[in-house]
Amino acid sequence: MFGETVMEASCERSNLQAALGQVRANKGSPGGDHLTVDELPGFLREHWPAIKERVLSGEYEPQAVRRVEIPKPGSQEKRKVGIPCVLDRLIQQAVLQMLQPQWDGTFFESSYGFRPGRSAHQAVAQAQTYLQHGYEYGVDIRLYSK
């Protein structure tokens, strides 16, 4: 499932409904367009056909990310984060739902980055377990270039 078929499958109604459910569950603040998660379904009813056409033709471009600063826990410093608009989050989630099942099985069991049900905390815990069992090298970092 690559090329046009990924995008077509991503735009299927059932996939979009699941993606919308995930975006709503994640909540999150509005992006640069100030559209909220609760306003998204109404927006889609009116605008989805045109958006879908742009997505499938390759003409869709994500909107600028809204930059905000949030407090760092236990510090007076602030951390800069980017908040994409909810429409972009919906489209990203829809594509993720199509690609992730195809690719996740190709990762090593020891891979933790950007995988469902995996976290950086689990990676650190696994590295500590390797050290406790006497391994000198327990973390495999793979860097790839284009």
Image (spheres, rainbow, N blue to C red):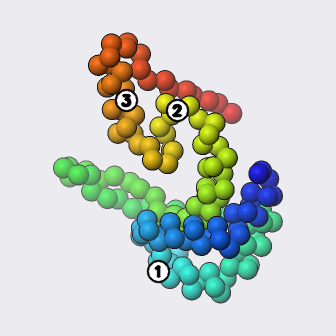
Which labelled disc corresponds to residue 109? Answer: 2
Q: Secondary structure at mark 1?
A: loop
Q: What separation in Å lies between label 1 and label 3 (alpha carbons)?
A: 39 Å
- Sequence-first disc among 1 and 3: 1
Query: Quick one: label 2, few (<14), some, or many (20+) residues within 10 Å?
Result: few
- Sequence-first disc among 3 and 2: 2
Residue 145 or 21: which is nearer the viewer? 21
Q: Identify the residue at horizontal 39%, vertical 62% (top origin).
A: 68
| Position of residue 110 measured from the top left corner of the image (x, y, whole percent) | 49, 30
| Position of residue 10 measured from the top left corner of the image (x, y, whole percent) | 69, 63
Classify residue 16 as left or right of residue 83: right
Amino acid on which the number 3 mark rests in the picture: Gln
| Position of residue 136 measured from the top left corner of the image (x, y, whole percent) | 37, 12
Residue 56 or 69: which is nearer the viewer? 56
Q: What separation in Å lies between label 3 and label 2 (alpha carbons)?
A: 12 Å
Q: Identify the residue at horizontal 37%, vertical 37% (top origin).
A: 122
